[in-house]
Amino acid sequence: MPKVTRIELHLQTGGQRNAGTDGDIYLGICGREFYIDSPEDDFETGATRTYVFAGAGSDRNVLHPELNDPTTHNLTTENIEKFPVYIRFQPHASAPRSDRWQLQRADVYLNGLDLYEWSTASIIKGPGIWLGVHAGLVMHLARHIDSAPSRPPVRREQVS
C-alpha cells in the first residue's frame, strides 16, 4: 500500500459571535492524531486556513512539523478504511468547561489525490456546528467516493 506523504486540511471557523477559540484542535486520520496549529492566530471567527502536514523540504506550514510529519509515522493508505477521520476540539485550559468553537467546514486530502478525500460539507448545514464540553468534542468527516466535490480554494491567510 502507498505511504501517506502529505495531508492537506482546509479548515473554516464559523462566523457567529464568539465562534473562535484559543483551544487546541486535532485531526485524526489513519489511526493517529495531528496537532493543528500555525504561526498565525488560528481558529478566529470567520477564518479559513489551509494546513499542510508533510515531510521536510515540502511546503508544510504547521507548527511542530517534525512531530506532525506523516512520513515519519509509517502511515499507509491501507489504514484509511480501518480508522475514522475526525476533528477533535480540546477547550482552552483557562476555561475548559465554557470554551467552545464553531466548526463551519473541514476538508481533508491525502497525497494530493482526490481519491482520498473527506469533508463535513454533506454533514454540517447552516451556520456550523458547535464543539465544546457541553456540545461534544469530536466531529467525524464523511469520505467522498466516486463524486468527489471540487477542492475549495487554497487560502493560507485569514479571511475577515
Image (cartoon, rainbow, N blue to C red):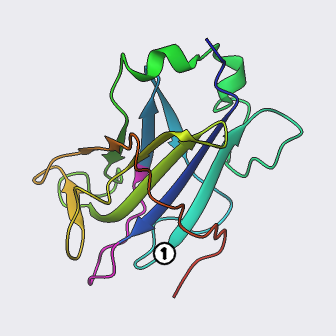
Q: In this view, does 116 lie above or below 90?
A: above
Residue appearing at x 36%, y 54% in the figure: 92
Residue 86 in the magenta stretch? The answer is no
Q: What stretch is highlighted in magenta?
A: 14-24
Q: Position of residue 73 (x, y in %)?
A: 63, 16
Q: Which of 85 and 67 is in front in this view?
A: 85
Q: Position of residue 78 (x, y in %)?
A: 50, 14
User: Depth check: 109 or 26 in front?
Assistant: 109
Q: Magenta part mainly helix, strand or loop? A: loop
What secondary structure is found at the residue carrying circle 1?
A: loop
Please identify the quarter of the rendering in which residue 140 is found: top left
Quadrant assignment for the N terminus? top right
| Residue 60 on image: x %, y % | 75, 47
Residue tagged 1:
47
* Residue found 51% across the figure and 88% down from its top: 160
| Amino acid type shown at disc 1 | Ala
Q: At x 10% / y 53%, what residue is drawn?
A: 134
Sort mark 1 into few (<14), some (14-19) or many (20+) by Cα contacts within 10 Å: many
Name the residue at 64% across, 13% down.
74
Residue 64 visible in the picture: no
Residue 156 vs residue 98: left or right? right
Q: Residue 68 location in percent, x, y?
A: 63, 33
Instruction: Give above or below for 74 relative to 56.
Output: above
> Residue pushed farthest front?
146
Whether residue 134 is visible to the viewer of this picture, yes or no, is: yes
